[in-house]
Amino acid sequence: MAWVWSAAVPILIATVPCAWADDDNVDRVLGSDHYVAGQVIRVDRPTPGDLVAAGGMIDVRAPVAGDVVAVGGSVELRAPVEDDVYAAGGSVRLESRVGESARLAGRSIVVTREAVVDGSLAAAGGSVRFEGQGGEAVSLAGPTLVFDGRAAGDVYLAGRDVTVGPSTVIDGKLTIRSARPAQIDPGARIGGEIVQEAVEVEEFRFQRVGDAAGRWFLGFWTVGVILAGVLLLVLAPHFLRRSAALVGVRPWPSLGLGFGLLVGVPVASVLAMVTLIGIPIGMLLLALYFPMLLAGYLNGALFVADRGLARLRPGADARRWPRILALVAVLIALSLLSGLPVVGGWIGFAVLLFGLGALALRLFGASPAPEPAP
């Protein structure tokens, strides 16, 4: 799922202007790439580069020469895509040729008989049905799986109820991991080995409970951070505007000072508590440490929000509500990106260090530009 979250930042920032734009959709062309967000999106003209779309309903009807990244309530791909497809939504339907690989996620996923994926295909969802053709390996995961298509490589199916239909043609190996016995039609043609592994229902149940608990915790944490960010932005909009701008004006001093504060404050608090007189000072430093980190993180996120807002809608970064909406979008995107292995943690860490250092520079009197007139 890393591909979904790697696309989240541009998608979420792009959707922010929808709250106050005159048109229903936000539509941008940067070079050969097409970025669009809105309630109903229909792509009727060929895209010479990549297509990035986010919305309630996405319908791609014209060819795309590059990649497709689509996140929406429903996603339908009816036209050829020369490179990769990354799609996620409530329902995802692939009806066209994909020149390279496809990665699909959603509550309901259908790959029709017209679909041909020259590379590998991986799909995960509540219900996944594959009737198309895969040029390489095909991997499906979800409670209910139906494979009734063709695959030139190996096929891996992991789910609770797995069905292999009569039109199945697999040149490679078929591996099935299911909680219940898989239903394999006698007409299915499988060239390689068939491996079936029984999986306890409790294993799936345990994984679902753990995943749900993690999502709830992440959701509550994100909501708390968003509320704190909105509160700070309402109480001190001008101060935060200038402190966030320092990340771009003085990035390396911000990074160095942020790292120094991150490491130095806990060390200083411990050293202070060595003596009886220094205990109150050490306790005070520890009490201020975590609010300081939160403020630094929000300051770094606000820098990203202001930059994205200024690029997409010049002048909107000086208004309160556009900035609040942009900050909320960036915080949600960062929360989603935190799920990326290794990279996600480093992204959040960088936002924290740059924002913390810039905030400290502003408190020490640094300014990115002359103070505006009141």
Image: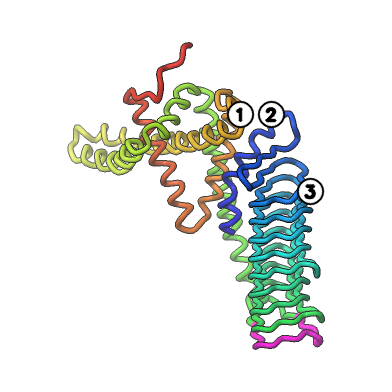
Q: Residue furthest left?
A: 275
* Residue sitting nearer the eye, 7 or 73: 7
Q: Which residue is mark 2?
A: 20
Task: Please state which of the two labelled residues, at mark 3 or mark 1, is closer to the viewer.
Answer: 3
At a point 42% along the width and 41% down the height, the residue shown is: 352
Task: Please state which of the two labelled residues, at mark 3 or mark 2, is closer to the viewer.
Answer: 3
Q: Which residue is mark 3?
A: 44
At a point 35% along the width and 40% down the height, the residue shown is: 255
At a point 49% along the width and 37% down the height, the residue shown is: 301
Where does the image place residue 109, in percent across and percent down from the top left? 74, 62
Q: CA distance from mark 3 to mark 2?
A: 25 Å
Q: CA distance from mark 3 to mark 1?
A: 30 Å
Q: Would you identify the image quadrant in which residue 266 lies?
A: top left
* Residue sitting nearer the eye, 113 or 294: 113
Residue density around tag 1, few if under 14, some if 14–19, many if 20 or more, within 10 Å: many
Instruction: For mark 3, give the secondary structure.
Output: loop
Q: Which residue is mark 1?
A: 322
Task: Give the residue type at disc 2.
Answer: Trp
Dot 1 and dot 2 residues touching (CB under 8 Å): yes
Task: Give the residue type at disc 3.
Answer: Asp
